[in-house]
């Protein structure tokens, strides 16, 4: 447990994420200045953090003294001048560029020229935010995952003008707060929200192909890939609207690559207001104790050329311990190779290192292995052969691999 070191962080936004970051920083030994346009919201957030600290004491994860000290380190900042002593300011407000620029811009004059500005954005340009607040070299992304006190991953995003020493310092701070930071370039989706897209999208495409229902696809991916949740269960939990919006944003910003093209079936769910668990219906219906599939599938027979089935079989031999029917193996292999391919593209384009991609996907999405770890386990020849065979059957170029795939898997 870190001891109080005199460092101070300002957190703008006292919602769920802001309160969570405040808890993380205070337990990590930092003084916290929590600020919101609604000071009553700050008070409620501090009270909630206090309750969570008490639960950690009950679970013997903190001592009473540690919890009390952490609670005492969080105070309300009523105006920007009270952030003057902050080494770091983090905004944790709505995902809107102009709103984020305004709240950070409003506090720039109160802080020293050495202060660091961090945005908790999951999809917006860190470079644009830094430029618009007039502190491009001192601005970084610090993307926590919800719930921030529980999930260990923090994506540290360097804007195009971010000073390298500033990025290094934010990485160090994340570690002081007992988090696991990974470094990412300022590109759409960063690591997790980009590399995770094929887990959902290829599953939607398999559904559209009429090869299996949502419950079957979820079962296969959990059974063969040891994923904790299937893609349809997970999108229903996230919210079909939220998941679809992220997909559309990443797809548009990355030049509308066929790998990331949104699913018409998912878009129709959103249009109909069937958003998942929060509306009682999405990919599943939540009227009974056990969710039931809500999407009817026009079944088509699974017919594949022998060379594709052979590529799947060779891929499966190294991918995991489970075996199944030709269709089950095909579904798992098709989704997994799409994830591996997107990870390879992210590495090839300089989004992050292989190690950081693997760490991000294991900690940010609970994948049992990092995609490029899986690729190394399977081997480059098997991965490229499967991609080549899938590309021959596809009506687009989503299975095209980067030249870096070989370097990523050997």
Image (cartoon, rainbow, N blue to C red):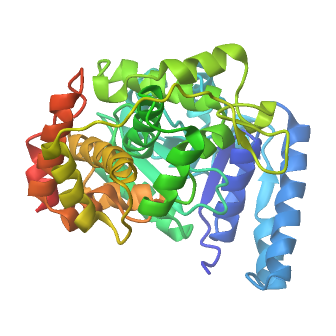
Task: Reply above or below: 151 against 347.
Answer: below
Do we see residue 154 in this rendering? no
Q: Nearer the viewer, residue 401 or 311?
A: 311
**Residue 408, quarter of picture:** bottom left
Instruction: From the top left corner, tell me how far across and down residue 118 is, in percent.
Output: 51, 42
Task: Reply above or below: 304 against 47.
Answer: above
**Residue 262, quarter of picture:** top left
Task: Reply above or below: 23 against 94.
Answer: below
Residue appearing at x 12%, y 47% in the figure: 384
**Residue 178, quarter of picture:** bottom right
For the view shown, which residue lies furthest in the top direction?
271
Q: Nearer the viewer, residue 104 or 144?
A: 144
Residue appearing at x 10%, y 62% in the figure: 410
Location of the N terminus by quadrant is bottom right
Residue appearing at x 64%, y 50% in the figure: 146
Instruction: From the top left corner, tell me how far across and down residue 346 is, in percent.
Output: 26, 42
How many marks the image carries: the answer is: 0
Q: Quick check: 263 left or right of 51? A: left
Q: Quick check: 173 left or right of 17? A: left
Residue appearing at x 39%, y 39% in the figure: 198
Task: Reply above or below: 196 against 229.
Answer: above
Do we see residue 25 in this rendering? yes
Instruction: From the top left corner, tell me how far across and down residue 171 is, in percent.
Output: 41, 59
């Amino acid at each position: 447990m870190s001891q109080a070191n005199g460092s101070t962080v300002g957190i703008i936004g006292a919602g769920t994420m802001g309160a969570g970051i405040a808890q993380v920083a205070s337990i990590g030994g930092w003084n916290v200045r929590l600020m919101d346009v609604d000071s009553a919201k700050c008070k409620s957030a501090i009270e909630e953090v206090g309750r969570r600290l008490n639960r950690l004491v009950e679970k013997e994860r903190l001592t009473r003294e540690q919890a009390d000290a952490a609670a005492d380190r969080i105070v309300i900042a009523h105006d920007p001048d009270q952030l003057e002593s902050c080494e770091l300011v983090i905004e944790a407000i709505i995902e809107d560029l102009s709103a984020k620029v305004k709240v950070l811009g409003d506090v720039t004059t109160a802080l020293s020229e050495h202060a660091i500005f961090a945005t908790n954005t999951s999809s917006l340009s860190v470079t644009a935010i830094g430029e618009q607040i007039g502190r491009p070299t001192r601005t970084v992304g610090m993307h926590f995952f919800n719930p921030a006190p529980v999930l260990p991953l923090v994506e540290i995003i360097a804007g195009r003008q971010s000073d390298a020493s500033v990025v290094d310092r934010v990485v160090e701070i994340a570690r002081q707060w007992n988090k696991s930071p990974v470094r990412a370039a300022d590109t759409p989706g960063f690591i997790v929200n980009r590399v995770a897209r094929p887990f959902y999208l290829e599953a939607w495409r398999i559904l559209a192909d009429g090869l299996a229902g949502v419950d079957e696809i979820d079962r296969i991916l959990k059974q063969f890939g040891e994923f904790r949740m299937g893609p349809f269960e997970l999108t229903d939990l996230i919210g079909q609207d939220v998941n679809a919006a992220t997909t559309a944003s990443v797809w548009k910003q990355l030049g509308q690559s066929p790998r990331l093209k949104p699913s018409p079936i998912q878009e129709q769910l959103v249009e109909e207001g069937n958003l998942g668990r929060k509306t009682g219906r999405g990919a599943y219906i939540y009227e009974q104790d056990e969710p039931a599939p809500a999407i009817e599938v026009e079944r088509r027979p699974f017919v594949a050329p022998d060379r594709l089935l052979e590529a799947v079989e060779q891929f499966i031999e190294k991918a995991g311990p489970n075996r199944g029917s030709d269709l089950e193996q095909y579904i798992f292999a098709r989704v997994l190779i799409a994830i591996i391919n997107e990870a390879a593209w992210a590495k090839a384009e300089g989004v992050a290192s292989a190690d950081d991609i693997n760490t991000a996907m294991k900690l940010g999405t609970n994948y049992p292995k990092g995609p490029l770890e899986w690729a190394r386990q399977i081997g480059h020849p098997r991965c490229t052969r499967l991609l080549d065979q899938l590309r021959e059957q596809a009506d687009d170029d989503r299975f095209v691999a980067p030249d870096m795939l070989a370097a990523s898997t050997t």
